[in-house]
Every structure is written in structure tokens, then in C-alpha cells.
Amino acid sequence: MRYFIKFSCYGHHLHGDQSGSVDRDHNLPGSRLLLHNPDRIEAEHHLMDQLPYSLNQCSRTVVLDALRQVCIHRGWTLFAAHVRSTHVHVIVDAEVQPEKIMNDFKSYASRRLNRSGLEEPNRKRWARHGSTRWLWNDEDVRSAIRYVIEEQGEIMAAFVAEGI
């Protein structure tokens, strides 16, 4: 199956954010996103035990390399990836559930960042979950790649497979 996976850095996409979010009560396909709620954002900020995490250029490159390596190791096909300063987009084909893929991406990226020595190993880097969307046909894949590569602003650390 082909998936469009997005996960955010710790502290950058909180419930109640203007860009929309889901929680345990608002997570069914086709259901409405949570409305903007400054009070909820403030409450979630108070629950954080570390400052929000952002990826600099060096760490974005490390994360992109980790995404590519986990796909090689697991036998998954990486169509495209774009590592931004506050979130990561990946389009991938794999015969496992998207939550497993996202968890492996986060684990490999964290391990690589730890080994790089760029920051403290106990740093929280990723939000608890993320977004997983199934891509049902080739046009869905092409549209997701266009969005990830062309509609995110300045390219930071990106990969697109040849021939797509």
C-alpha cells in the first residue's frame, strides 16, 4: 500500500492549532478537524516538559538520510520525502500498516540524530502521533508528491525517486 505520512516535531502542532488537528475523539476518516482553540493550545503548552523542537539544516539532512535508510532496510519504496524545520512529509509504499512505518521513521531518525552528536540524546523530537493517509491510485501519489515538494515553500531537505 502507498501512504502519505506526516509527523511533526515536538511542540509545533498542538491540539487546537489553527491549521487543524485531530484527537482521540475526532479521528475518524471524514470527520471534522478540531476547531481553533487558544485555551487548549495554552493548556498543552503547560503540559510540555521541554521546549518545542526544530530541525536545523544539518539535522534535516540527518533525518532525510535516516528515512532513506529505513526504507532500504525494510524493503519499502520511498517515493518522496521533505524534511522541514517543524515537520516531515513522506510518501512511501510498504506492505505494513502506516503507523508502523511512521514509528520506524521516528525511531531511525532519533537514533541517527543521537549518533550525530548534534544534540542531547534525551531530547523529545517528535509529536506523539501524526497523519497517515492512504494513496489509492497513481494520481493520488503524484498529487501528494507535488504537494510535498512544490507546495511547502522553500525546499529544505528533500528526496524524490527517479522516474516519478
Image: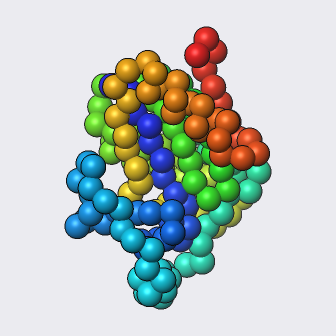
In the image, residue 128 lies at what x, y percent? 40, 62
| Image vertical order of residue 108 relative to residue 23, above or below | above
Q: Quadrant of the C terminus?
A: top right
Which residue does the image show at 51% across and 69% down from the upper left? 18
Q: Nearer the viewer, residue 86 or 34?
A: 34
Q: Position of residue 148 (x, y in %)?
A: 59, 38
Considering every residue shown, the one lying at the far top of the view is: 163
Is residue 65 among what the camera can see?
no
Report how many numbered discs are placed on residues in the image.
Answer: 0
Front residue (pair 44, 126)? 44
Q: Quadrant of residue 114?
A: bottom right
Which quadrant holds residue 80?
top right
Quadrant where the N terminus sits is top left
Residue 44 placed where, x, y %?
Answer: 44, 81
Answer yes or no: is residue 143 visible. Answer: yes
Q: Is residue 51 left or right of residue 43?
A: right
Q: Is residue 120 above or below residue 150?
A: below
- Which of the colour schemes (rainbow, by chain, secondary structure, one colour) is used? rainbow
Left or right: 111, with 129 as reference point: right
Residue sitting at x 52%, y 38%: 90
In the displayed structure image, the side of residue 136 where residue 91 appears, left or right? right
At x 55% / y 78%, what residue is drawn? 50
